[in-house]
Image: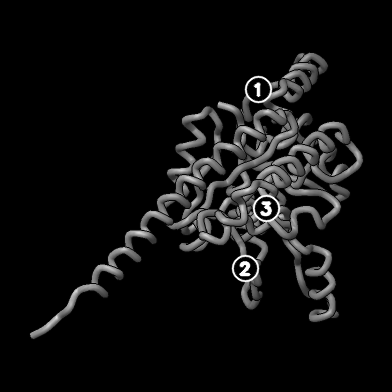
Amino acid sequence: MVDFGSNDTLSLTSSGVLRKAFLDEIARHPDFEVGSRSTRIFEGSTKYLLDLEDHMAQFHRAESALFLPSGYEANVAIWSTVPQHGDVVVYDEYIHASIHDVYSMDGDVAPVHEMLKLTKEILPHGNAVFTIDEAHSNGLIGDNGEQRRTRLQNNIQRFYEKITGHSEWAKCVFGGILSLPTQKTWHTGSFQTPIIPLITELGQATKLTQKLHEAGYQVNSVFYPIVPRDKERVRLVIHADNTTAQIDEVVDLIMNWSRSRLADQLKRSNLLVSGEDMYQDVAFSD
């Protein structure tokens, strides 16, 4: 399937760039040991891993870094140790098991600078710890990878312009068939986020996902409790290596499905009106 679902937004995995970098790194370190051998407090902390953590700390301009097997385990480690008795935890309204820099379900950008400014105003003594679970924007902003980021931004722009500029789009939104929370904001920032949240009618996200799967495009349906009950959606992720032809076909598939839903909606509406007219013509008596 053509990838419109994974978080490989810069296409580093699908293009083979990451594989080549990994093999080149192994070649430079022929004695590299595969496997942890032990826990981190014993023999598990190899020199290579410690050097890698130092490198990542410098990359993120942090005092130190610690690698864990997954984001979930990192959150468990942080939230089971950092908060102490008497502390208050304030979390974001859109938290999805963690707090994201580029939100994974709505595709918008967290106002981190504004949050920090407000925190300093409310807590002038600095007795606050700010935690960001950065899961989607790493590599999308910064000095490196300009060529791939430019391709990605162009693809995001094409998708939005193609779908919101479609002749049937306004009807679909008005009819409640589809909506985009990011429709009015996607182009306002310094960069566009690759996550496209297509909100559907209740019970329809799976059907639209299936339609795209049948055509060979990988996307994902998202439901409560990951999102609010009335905000089920098809979550698309645009990638740097998606072609314009693929983007155009995905939009056409979405809009063809939406037109079909609109036709069904109109048919139900006409049947309802016909039924009301029928009863108006009937004389009731006791």
Graded by Cα atoms within 10 Å as few (under 14), some (14 to 19) or many (20 or more), the crowding at tag 3 reads many
The label on residue 107 is: 3
Q: Secondary structure at mark 3?
A: loop
Compare residues 159 and 262 and report the one nearer the observer.
Answer: 262
Q: Name the residue carrying label 2.
A: 93
Q: Is residue 19 above or below residue 201?
A: above
Residue at 62% x, 68% y: name it. 93
Graded by Cα atoms within 10 Å as few (under 14), some (14 to 19) or many (20 or more), the crowding at tag 1 reads few
Query: Given the image, on which type of amino acid does mark 3 rest?
Result: Gly
Q: CA distance from mark 3 to mark 1?
A: 36 Å
Residue at 53% x, 58% y: name it. 227
Total labels: the figure holds 3
Q: Secondary structure at mark 1?
A: loop
Query: Looking at the picture, how far across and down is residue 64, in whole percent?
Result: 81, 48
Q: Is residue 275 above or below residue 192?
A: below
Q: Nearer the viewer, mark 2 or mark 1?
A: 2
The reply to whether discs 2 and 1 touch (Cβ–Cβ < 8 Å) is no
Query: Given the image, on which type of amino acid does mark 1 rest?
Result: Val
Q: Name the residue carrying label 1.
A: 34
Q: Residue furthest bottom?
A: 286
Q: Residue furthest left?
A: 286
